[in-house]
Amino acid sequence: MKLIDTHSHLYSSEFDQDRTVVVKAAISAGVNTILLPNISSEYTKGINNLCAEFPNNCFAMMGLHPCDVKAETSTSELQHVQQELATGKYIAVGEIGLDLHWDKSTLEIQKKAFIQQIEWAKHYTLPIAIHVRDSFTEAIEIIEKLNDKNLRGVFHCFTGNTTDAQRVINLDGFYLGIGGVLTFKNSGLDKTIKKIDIQHLILETDAPYLAPTPFRGKRNESKYIVNIAEKLAEIHTIELSEVARITTKNAKQLFDL
């Protein structure tokens, strides 16, 4: 059984003491492919170093996270993204999008950065990994407006309702990224996902954040993708192997793995 963690920050400082061990543990658990979305230029070297250490298992994305879109640095940060994408060594543009949880005052420059990176994704025919914390409506309106045959991607950490899910599905070529929140007792996401065909889903951990039950509150790891897959199998009353087969196929198709 093979699984893909489509969104993991294993290059972050939370893994400085045991990063290699954590990756090997994931591989041993059947999570043989881990995708690494970027946050800002500060992390590019760490991502590329990890991909060099595990060239058959770790694959990098390039993008500017909306929380790192600042008036004083966004121009230079976006230039960095553009230069890195031109090298051709990235499998997606991400993590990009909008975040209205931490700072609503930067919404307009967040939108500009988001749109610019969408255009680069189209240019290079790369998928996008979209961050939509407290901003799903604003983000999907931009995607709906810009959507065409050159755009595809995933709504990372999807926690919306069935109407939200259907808007994503209607885009054609976009998936719902399902992580540890699915296992949270009172999230309600399980009820939504029960109504959504698994063909529209891919799995992710967002490590080191949002560890699934029974590890909630602890550091998340890519090997815990298995726990998320088990919950999805339970919700859809299908075998774990079938969840692995379908979500892996979906991820391979989206990210051209």
Image (cartoon, rainbow, N blue to C red):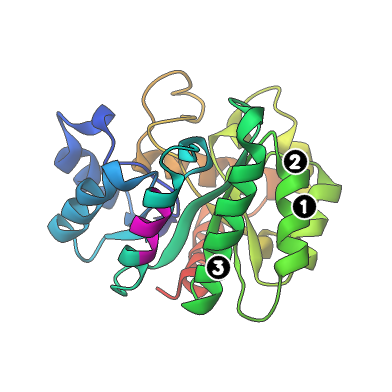
Three-letter amino acid code at the position of disc 2: Gly
| Quadrant of the image containing the N terminus | bottom left
> What residue does disc 2 label?
160
Which is more toward the observer, 240 or 114? 114
- View extreme (top): residue: 217
State the image coordinates of residue 92 (x, y, percent, origin top left).
44, 65
State the image coordinates of residue 195 (x, y, percent, origin top left).
80, 50
State the image coordinates of residue 117 (x, y, percent, origin top left).
52, 61
Which is more toward the observer, 74 or 138? 74
> What residue does disc 1 label?
165
Report the magenta stretch's main SS: helix
Span highlighted in magenta in the image:
77-82
Q: Which sits earlier in the primary sequence, circle 1 or circle 2?
A: 2
The residue positioned 66% from the left and 23% from the top of the image is: 185
* Side (left or right) of 154 relative to 11: right
Numbered disc total: 3
* Side (left or right) of 228 relative to 62: right
The residue positioned 45% from the left and 54% from the top of the image is: 6
Is residue 163 something one can see in this rendering?
Answer: yes
Label 3 – label 1 distance at C-alpha: 16 Å
Circle on res. 250:
3
